[in-house]
Each structure stands twice: as C-alpha cells, then as structure tokens.
Image (cartoon, rainbow, N blue to C red):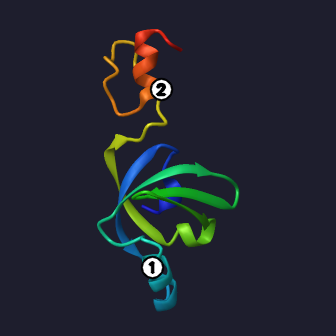
C-alpha cells in the first residue's frame, strides 16, 4: 500500500520505492530505504510529514505515493491509551496521565 494511505501515528515498514532511478536514489539518500521503519506524523492536502529514524521528512503527496509500505501492528506515541492501560510506554505524556498529572 502507498505511504499516503497510512493514518497519522501509524508505523509501517518500507517495502519498495516506485519511480525513475533518480527519484529512487533521492528518496534513498534521505533515508527511505527498503526495510526501514517509518511513522506518518501528519498528512495535509499536499504535504506528508513522516519520521524515519530520528529524522522528520516532508514529502510531496505524489512523491510519498511512490513509497510502498506494509503497516506494522504498533502505533507511535500519537495515540491515546485506553483507560485500563497501565501507561508504562515511552511517552511521558501518557505515563503522567495515569499518575494524574494531566
């Protein structure tokens, strides 16, 4: 599935990059390589903001549609936790919420 079909906060594994050789080499130089994990941060009308490793990248919608991904079962920090979740994740905001700071 294309990268543009992910929901914000959803993580995916990059499987393939379609397009011309110069397009593929440009995306690979930015860190979008096969096997890398990416997270969709936001998606506007024409800009797709993703996170690859420790970097945030802004891609054109047409360029992001060329990146084919497989969604993983985990989600990023952008989700709300369930009420009965113990809140031991990496995100301090959600951890503090369970302690009553929020």
In the drawing, what numbered circle is on residue 59? none
N-term mark: 1 or 2: 1
Please report the residue visible at 50 percent of the width from the left and 12 percent of the height from the top. 101
Please report the residue visible at 50 percent of the width from the left and 72 percent of the height from the top. 66
Compared to residue 34, the image places residue 85 above or below, namely: above
Task: Sort mark 1 into few (<14), some (14-19) or many (20+) by Cα contacts within 10 Å.
Answer: few
Compared to residue 21, the image places residue 98 above or below, namely: above
Q: Are marks 1 and 2 in contact (CB under 8 Å)?
A: no
Q: Residue furthest top?
A: 100
Question: In the displayed structure, does residue 86 sit left or right of residue 7?
Answer: left
Q: Quadrant of residue 60?
A: bottom right
88 and 4: which is toward the camera: 88
Q: Is residue 81 something one can see in this rendering?
A: no
Q: Which residue is mark 1?
A: 29
**Helix, strand or loop under label 1:** helix
Q: Is residue 31 something one can see in this rendering?
A: yes
In the drawing, what numbered circle is on residue 93? 2
Please report the residue visible at 59 percent of the width from the left and 49 percent of the height from the top. 42
Task: Sort mark 2 into few (<14), some (14-19) or many (20+) by Cα contacts within 10 Å.
Answer: some
Q: Position of residue 84 (x, y in %)?
A: 34, 12
Q: Position of residue 72 (x, y in %)?
A: 32, 49
Q: Quadrant of the N terminus?
A: bottom left
């Amino acid at each position: 599935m294309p990268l543009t079909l992910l929901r914000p906060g959803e993580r995916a594994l990059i499987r393939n990059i379609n397009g011309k050789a110069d397009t593929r080499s440009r995306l690979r130089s930015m860190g979008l390589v096969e096997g890398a994990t990416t997270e969709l941060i936001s998606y506007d009308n024409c800009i797709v903001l993703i996170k690859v490793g420790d970097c945030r990248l802004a891609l054109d919608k047409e360029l992001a549609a060329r990146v084919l991904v497989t969604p993983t079962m985990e989600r990023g920090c952008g989700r709300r936790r369930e009420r009965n979740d113990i809140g031991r994740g990496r995100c301090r905001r959600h951890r503090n919420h369970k302690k009553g700071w929020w």
